[in-house]
Amino acid sequence: MLIARSIIDYYRCPEHFLDFELSGPLSADEGFFRFGPSICYGRSCSGHRLSRVENGLYDVLGDASIQNSKATLPLSPSEVIDNLRLERYVLRARTYQWGKNTYYALRPWLSPGIRIIVKKMQLRGWQRIPFPGWPVDRTVENICEQLLLLSHQVHKSDRIPFIWFWPRGARGCVMMTHDVETLAGRDACAKLMDLDDSFDIKASFEIIPEERYGITPDFLDTIRRRGCEVAIHDLKHDGRLFDRHDKFLWRASKINQYAKQYGANTFRSGLLYRRPEWFDAFQFSADMSIPNVAHLDPQRGGCCTVMPYFIGNMIELPLTTTQDYMLFYLLGERSIDLWKKQTSMILEKSGLVSFIVHPDYTMSGEKRSYYQDLLTYLQGLRSSTNLWFALPREIDHWWRLRSKMSLVGDGDSWQICGEGSDQAVLAYATNVAGKLTYSIPSQERADSMKHVAAG
């Protein structure tokens, strides 16, 4: 069992740098514990585990050791990271099922104002949820960095090579998506594309195949012709997709047919309801249904990472910022400050900044103004920072290419091998006073040349 497989896949670094061993047998029970500052869920080789996050979680980091040029760990990092990414730490009680079904049965007759009141009632106490961390949870990133710091101690090396996360050395990635939920939203798509185009941003449009509105070939062709992407958004957006496995399989089969008909490679469920263990029924290349932290969503949880990752053969592109509906209607925000804070936290880890903005209530009044503020902010980041603005299909394609690349030693240097390596960049992770820092030599040389030329 290669307990560090998730870390190797995360960094795409040579395996010998992450050759860890378990310090003993893993516990029979699962629960919460700490690995330094990071909250983990799963089994461990030492200490105790609790059924919920509270003060006094046992920290297993102190039980890690370095012996015979190898680090022994009191946990399996791959198991813990899978438990976070797949939300296995969430209590899967279905006590909310009756209330959810009742709400969706009555929803067509509820005014928008009443729906907001109901949703706010459901959110009571969300600020007190201790885990995942609000407003962005970076637990997976922190665990990966902690393990690379341990690897530095084992190998006594100044730096560890890895394949940078994004093509051409981009600091991070930005993905804009638009969930189209009503007839008014469908009819506003053209104007929304005009607005996005004025800031040189292309987006993905998530289309509901049944019952909500009519879908014509010309509508879909317009989205594609303008350089945007068509994705599937549930089947009926009625909150029922994952209620029962047998009915889910029937619905998934219909969704797959629409995906083939529309030429869509990416899926997002309605209201971000999800059961990752059922995703193998989909015939999509990528999914966008799992939030980073889901305190404000009907289904709580979160994948605790700001990077794409595999779920079986699908690439998960997590939602890493708060949806516009939650931001403006449930939280009552009157600025994009939260979006800015989340973006900054994500880019600190060189992650994926992904947004959901609905055309249904974005193209008029103050909501349009806020969205323009966001586009202006992103345009400023683009001009000052090397960011990759990409569609879901482009990120999916890149992440698959990167997952098959490898680093091969070439004397005192390293060579990136594999399809797409011409876009890949060699990076190094360095231990600086106990903190992991990343550097890209090719960019440093380019910046140095610019400085010399300017001088």
Image (spheres, rainbow, N blue to C red):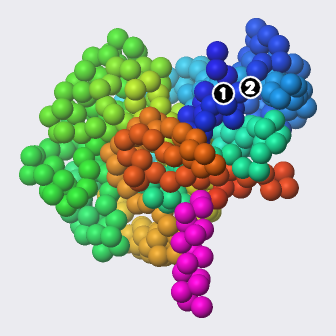
Packing grade of label 2 (10 A; few <14, some 14-19, many >=20) is many
Query: Where in the figure is residue 78, as x and y percent of width and height?
Result: 64, 26
The extreme front residue here reads 411
Pointers 1 and 2 in contact (CB under 8 A)?
Answer: yes
Q: Quick check: 449 left or right of 191?
A: right
Residue 319 drawn at (x, y percent): 49, 46
Residue type highlighted by circle 2? Phe
Q: From the viewer's perspective, is residue 276 above or below residue 415?
A: above
Whether residue 58 can be seen here: no
Q: Which residues are magenta?
A: 440-455
SS at mark 2 in the image: loop
Q: Which residue is mark 1?
A: 4
- Give the secondary structure at mark 1: loop
The C terminus sits in image quarter: bottom right
Q: Quadrant of residue 348?
A: bottom right
Amino acid at the residue labelled 1: Ala
Q: Is residue 443 magenta?
A: yes
- Measured from the top left, where is residue 266 in percent x and y? 32, 39
Q: Is residue 81 above or below residue 203?
A: above
- Residue 439 vertical position relative to residue 78 in the rendered view, above or below: below
Residue at x 59% of width, y 53% of height: 427
Residue 16, percent across and down? 67, 31
Residue assigned mark 2: 20
Is 228 or 400 nearer to us in this picture?
Answer: 400
Crowd rating for badge 1 (residues with CA inside 10 Å; few <14, some 14–19, many 20+): many
